[in-house]
Every structure is written in C-alpha cells, then in structure tokens.
Image: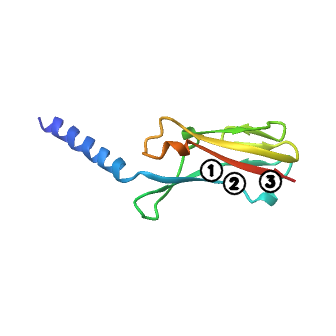
Amino acid sequence: MTYCSSILVNYINHEEFYEKHAIDHFTLELPPEEEMKVGKSAEIKVRAAFKDGKDIIMYLDPSQFKVSSSNPEIAQVNGSSIVIKAQGCVDVTVSISKNFIYKYDKKEQHIKIRLKIK
C-alpha cells in the first residue's frame, strides 16, 4: 500500500508541476545576421519562457522541434542547423513537437522567421 501511495503522490506532484509551469512563448535564437554567410552553418535554438512570471528559461532539446526551410537552395536544413547555400531571402519555420510535455498555446506550434542572406 505504501508503494501505491508513493506512486500516487509522485503523479500528483508531476501534474501540479506541469500545471504551474505552462509556456508563455517561444523564441528562436540564431547567430547575428552578419555571421549568416554563404558556406556557414547556423545552429537554431528554441527558447521557452514560462507564464509563472519567474525568470526561468528553458532551451528545447532538438528532438522537441523540427526545422524546415522554404528554399533549400538558399538554406538547407541539417537537424537543428541550417547550412547557408546561397544569397537571398528564405523563411525558416520551427515546429514544436506534438509530444512536447509542457502546456502551451497550440497557435504557437509553428514559429517562422525570414532570413536575408547577403
């Protein structure tokens, strides 16, 4: 019986933690634009900020999001990185995984940025 009580308490604590730590918004972090040059690679980081008002910031593991490019001839995706292939404008979209465990506004499931490669 003690074992079952322990499992229940852990479950409740787990649920309360996720209830109190909902995501307010996601932001994308890329190297500065002047570093985004043809032939270079850029790691994309996704940062989540929580709604509880605390300055807690969490970076998503690359398994929790997918990166896509509107034009692979300009920016080719390689996991959570993009490889700059040519000059031009390209939209990079990051999609948050459906199995992401924290609560968040599902409207923000896709985050898009436009890059101008010079």
Whether residue 27 is situated above or below residue 73 in the rendered picture: below
> Is 68 left, or right, of 116 in this rendering?
left
Q: Residue at x 48, y 46 (%)?
A: 105
Question: Which of the 4 image quadrants contains residue 80?
Answer: top right
Real-space Cα distance between discs 2 and 1?
7 Å
Number of marks in the rendered image: 3
How far apart marks 2 and 3 lie (CA) works out to 9 Å
Cα separation, mark 1 vs mark 3, equals: 15 Å
Q: Is residue 90 left or right of residue 102?
A: right
Q: Disc 2 vs disc 1: Cβ atoms closer than 8 Å?
A: yes
Q: Earlier in the sequence, mark 2 or mark 3?
A: 2
- Answer with mark 2 or mark 1, whichever residue precedes in sequence: 2
Residue marked by disc 3: 36
* Residue underneath mark 2: 30
Residue drawn where x is 80% and y is 53% of the image: 36
Q: Position of residue 13 (x, y in %)?
A: 27, 47
Check whether the beta carbons of the residues at disc 2 and disc 3 lie within 8 A of each other: yes
* Mark number, residue 86: none
Residue highlighted by disc 1: 45
Picture colour scheme? rainbow
Q: Amino acid at mark 3?
A: Met
Residue at left 53%, top 43%? 107
